[in-house]
Image (cartoon, helix red, strand yellow):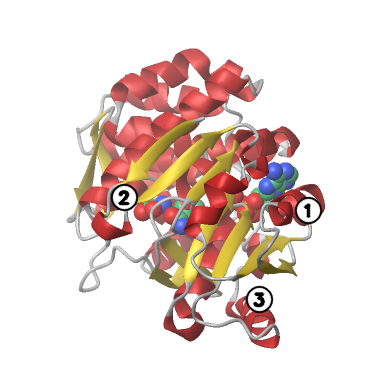
Amino acid sequence: MKTLHVELGDRRYPIHIGPGLLERPDLLRPHIPGQQALVVSNATVAPLYLDRARAALAGLRHEAVILPDGERYKTLETLNDIFTALLSHRFDRDCTLIALGGGVIGDMAGFAAACYQRGVHFIQIPTTLLAQVDSSVGGKTAVNHPLGKNMIGAFHQPRCVLADTDTLATLPDRELGAGLAEVIKYGLIRDLPFLEWLESHIERLLARETAALSEAIERSCRNKAAIVAADERETGERALLNLGHTFGHAIETGVGYGEWLHGEAVAAGMCLAADLSARLGWLRWEQVERVRALLARAGLPLEPPPALTTDDFLRLMAVDKKVRDGRLRLILLRDLGRGVIAGAVDPQRLRETLEAARRE
Ligand code: NAD
Ligand code: GLY
């Protein structure tokens, strides 16, 4: 097992990564201050892992709430099911919510923990690659609105992240690929050696070789933990983690939540960001090809859905948490391994990027 920490002063917390962690109550229990724990999971993950998670809670008062599976259920309405479970079991302010699942469950359980009685304890047990490398770390929680992705939410840090790599054995291939998009993102925005490592290990990751997966998770979490420690509330460099996301969120909202996986939309979004960076003279076209080649080897889409027009994109991209005073800010690349926050992107270049992608 490897343990990293997110350094947030008195809210510092560990990220444990390794096999067999669901069988380790000693890792979980020190982070549950009270006597009540509610496990939040979904109809796919619960039959696989809920019994093991609950076994680690023996001796506490523990309950579970099982939500429907899917991005389209990441809503205020589903969130209310968590509050109903907490209230009907008469859970108090010292209770702990435990997210057992992918990013959808983590984001919803975290938001419920941020809101219930104005804030209760929270633990993340991520079971997808995407959640183990990204969403379980850093305290961003949210639900979607029909008009915009992740638009209703809060910052609420977990007390501990337990990434049991054994759970990845049951993950569908398409979900594994979606997680790899966020892994590749770290290489592109701030870690060229990691990008090069990914270029030489992508097939091993797709084959789920344990050592390769563990290293990718650890190096991703190391990058994420450093960014979150430096900029917890995204006043600056944390925005770099959104490479490809403004385009990606537009795709997810535009085609309907759940049609494209989040990681797939981010992959196509990163291709658009690389293309735009090249049009601005910041990236060479052969570097754009290098980004696309790696994403293609991971089995990820390189182009946005043809059904979305350029005007659809521009309308949907205007609903983004990085918009300031009506002005779009995009994460682009000044070089491979060097993401930047671009505040005044030439609208003509942006249109050219979107139109070129539709011609592909
Ligand atoms: P997900 O939570 O929908 O999980 C993907 C699918 O895999 C689901 O069907 C789920 O039931 C299933 N699953 C989960 N674990 C499994 C396992 N071990 N075996 C078999 N099936 C399993 O999707 P995701 O990709 O994990 O997360 C995407 C979500 O995360 C999006 O809503 C996105 O906005 C959010 N996100 C949040 C952050 C953040 O910082 N909070 C960062 C990135 C993404
Ligand atoms: N996934 C983006 C962030 O955590 O900031």
Give x and y (percent) for residue 37: 62, 68
* Res 108 quadrant in image: bottom right
Cα distance in 3D space between marks 3 and 1: 23 Å
Can you tell me whether the CB of the residue at mark 2 lies under 8 Å from the nearest atom of ligand 2?
A: no
* Res 99 quadrant in image: bottom right
* Res 75 quadrant in image: bottom right
Q: Nearer the viewer, mark 3 or mark 2?
A: 3
Q: Is residue 223 above or below residue 126?
A: above
Cα distance in 3D space between marks 1 and 2: 49 Å
Give x and y (percent) for residue 92: 55, 83
Q: Residue at x 57, y 67 (%)?
A: 97
Q: Residue at x 59, y 61 (%)?
A: 98
| Residue labelled with disc 1 | 51
Give x and y (percent) for residue 131: 54, 47
Amino acid found under the numbered disc labelled 1: Asp
| Residue labelled with disc 3 | 78
Per the image, label 1 sits on a secondary structure element best described as: helix
Is residue 309 rendered to the left or right of residue 196? right
Q: Is residue 29 above or below residue 146?
A: above
In front of the other: 64 or 232: 64
Give x and y (percent) for residue 359: 50, 40
Name the residue at the right extreme. 47
Could you tell which of marks 3 and 1 lies nearer the N-terminus?
1
| Residue labelled with disc 2 | 350
Q: Residue at x 62, y 31 (%)?
A: 19
Tag shown at residue 273 = none
Q: Is residue 102 above or below residue 116?
A: above
Could you tell which of marks 3 and 2 lies nearer the N-terminus?
3
Amino acid found under the numbered disc labelled 3: Thr
Q: Nearer the viewer, mark 1 or mark 2?
A: 1
